[in-house]
Amino acid sequence: LTVLSGFLVTFSLGFPILPSTTTTVHIVPVECDDDWIALADLRFDEWIQDGTSRDAFRLATKDLYREERPKSMLFLAKKQNDEKEELRHHPSNNNGHPDSPTSMVTMGAAELSPYELDQALSKTGPVSALYVTDVVTDRKFRRQGVARRLMERVEEHAAAIGTTHLLLHVAYENSSAIHFYGTLGYRVPTLELLSFLDVPTLEASAGTRGQILLEKRLR
């Protein structure tokens, strides 16, 4: 669940599993203004179905992370636009040059967040956990290994900063996502982890009541 300054967006983490192409996927952190626009446009195209303004959604996305969630780490999946395919809605996806064969196109995104666990995880226990949320792949680029590459980068970054566990939620009916995360090593939380975790508080914070909680131990 994502709330963007008045916009309420509900979705489930789900995507096909097996890549069908050999597209090279580059995973980069969200850093510059063009990255923020690319992130917002990706989410807008995949989630928003009402008459919400794209420009308003872009502004709300940037404000959310700069003012309310500055500690979140966001990653974009990109590829070279070597086929000069039709670009997305903003020149940020091709460095401002629609005809450039070496431009980058945004394929997906993922967020690594401390906020959902802030009040749910014991501060005195041995567990250092982060929450994976807002994993989304552009529908044009599904079955190309985008989600897997994003998760690999998320896990690499989390491990590098000393995180012991990653947590995420998946809807019960989303069998493809459950299987996908299973292939990456995500399981139902152990009793040891649950002894340091207030699950109802986490669900309330993440807006995920009624979904399956999965965890992966990184070290």
Image (cartoon, helix red, strand yellow):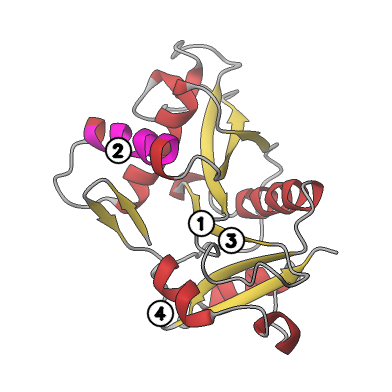
Q: Is residue 202 visible from the viewing direction of this image? A: yes
Q: Is residue 10 above or below residue 137?
A: below
Q: Residue lying farthest bottom? A: 191
The residue under label 4 is 209
Q: Are marks 4 and 1 in contact (CB under 8 Å)?
A: no
Please tell me in which quadrant of the rendered image residue 197 appears. Answer: bottom right
N-terminal label among 3 and 4? 3
Residue kind at label 1, given as amino acid type: Tyr
> Which of the 4 image quarters holds residue 191?
bottom right
Q: Main secondary structure of the magenta part?
A: helix
Image location of residue 149, percent across then percent down: 69, 49
Q: Which residues are magenta?
A: 56-66
Cα distance between the residues tagged 2 and 3: 22 Å
Q: CA distance from mark 3 to mark 4?
A: 15 Å
Q: Does the magenta-highlighted stretch encompass residue 213? A: no
Disc number lying in front (4 or 1): 1
* Residue that carries the numbered disc 3 in the rendered image: 131
Q: Would you name the residue on which mark 2 appears?
A: 60
Q: CA distance from mark 1 to mark 3?
A: 8 Å
**Label disc, if present, on residue 115 of the rendered structure:** 1
